[in-house]
Image: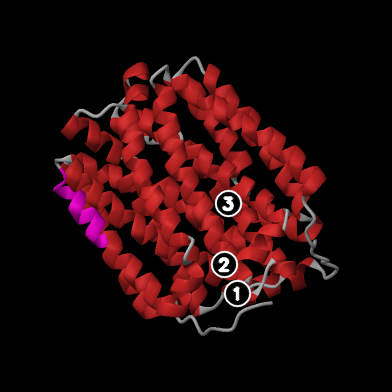
Amino acid sequence: MVEKSVFHNKNLYIIFGVTLIAMMGVASITPAFPDIIRYFAISPQQVGWLIVAFTLPGIFLTPFTGILADRYGRKLVLVPSLFLFGLAGFACMFAPGFYTLLALRFLQGVGASSLSSMNITLVGDLFSGKTRTAVMGYNASVLSIATATYPAMGGLIALFGWQYIFALPILALPLGLWVIRGLTNPEPKNKAGLRSYFGKVWRTINQRTVWGLLAVNFILFLILYGSYLTYFPLMMETRLGADSSRIGLMMSLMSVVTAIISSQLLRLNRLLGQKRQLLIGSVFYLAATLLMVRAHSYPLLASAVIVFGFAHGITIPSIQNMLVGFAAINERAAFMSLNSMVLRGGQTFGPLLIGVFYTMGGLAATFYAGALLALLMMLVILVSVHPAAKTGH
């Protein structure tokens, strides 16, 4: 069976490792935001710059790393990225001031810029058909386990001091060594000139469904990094007086739900179909953000977080699985790096956009903004996404 045989492939666990590291940069530090605000005497809007500084390099660098990976191989990009991520992230632990911390986060973001596209690119390189769908779901589950574990872990570590959460990125260094020695993937053989290469990449991108999926991903990450990751911790502290450990555990609940739903991607595809999955996901994002507006107790918060986790679990792996099939191996890294660039855009502008709503209307406004974005996502899916579109091999 697909579900069992795939776990004998050693490359799968390297992909999982890259996914775990890629998620570490934000998920592990958000529970410590209230502590960082107090330590550096900064505002809630300013603390969002820790996310912005990390995600901003990906907007500009990800396309170049994708092109390099297509022209010269995946390892040439992946290994240096992991090393830079680990070293710059670890250095954040010793930052003497907030602006130094931002500068180190920027360098860590340079290292991270290729990771969230390279893991999906490797899934596309190594697997196909139903196996690829199953692996995409499993990888999304690992991603969700990371986002479940990191907030709880970060929250507990932050009880001893916010600086200690930046010891975690050093784990990227042994993973880089494992990639060098253990990854056995097919590498692209790009002998065509750059003009021909870019022409193929553009033809792959310039399809209505591709643009629709990229737009949905951008909106999704505006909600995730704006309303949820930046302002949900502040909402818990303000309304319930929660400390970093409780914030981390509550945020982990969302990721546990996401992991369970993502692992069933192959079955969900058979049952619902791809477009219906995305529409259901957008409805659940809408419901979750509206619930958060009124969440003044732990049971109501838990309900909102569970609904958000369901939306995440049904939407993200479905989008990734649809996108990765559009490009052939020789253009896949550049194509998926465009998706990663879009994600970085959502991650970067989410805290800034939702911060405007926070300034105008307080915490409730940040979640109303998330609900409006969920409605926009639904409209884009209805108009632009056609899953029967021609894909690559």
Q: Which residue is mark 2?
A: 134
- Residue type at the position of mark 3: Ser
- Sequence-earlier tag: 1 or 3: 3
In the image, what residue type sits under mark 1?
Answer: Lys
User: Which residue is denoted by mark 3 in the rendering?
Assistant: 116
Q: Nearer the viewer, mark 3 or mark 2?
A: 2
Local SS, label 3: helix
What secondary structure is found at the residue carrying circle 2?
helix
Q: CA distance from mark 1 to mark 3?
A: 22 Å
Q: Which mark is residue 130?
A: 1
Look at label 2 and name its amino acid: Ala
In this figure, which colouring scheme has been used for the structure? secondary structure
Closer to the observer: label 1 or label 3?
1
N-terminal label among 3 and 2: 3
Q: Residue 304's x, y, as percent?
A: 24, 51
Within-10-Å neighbours for mark 3: few <14, some 14–19, many 20+: many
Residue 178 or residue 331, whichever sits in front: 178
Q: Is residue 363 above or below residue 3?
A: above
Q: Which residues are magenta?
A: 286-295
- The residue depicted at 59 percent of the width and 63 percent of the height is 135
Q: Residue at x 63, y 77 (%)?
A: 203
Residue 288 colored in magenta in the image: yes
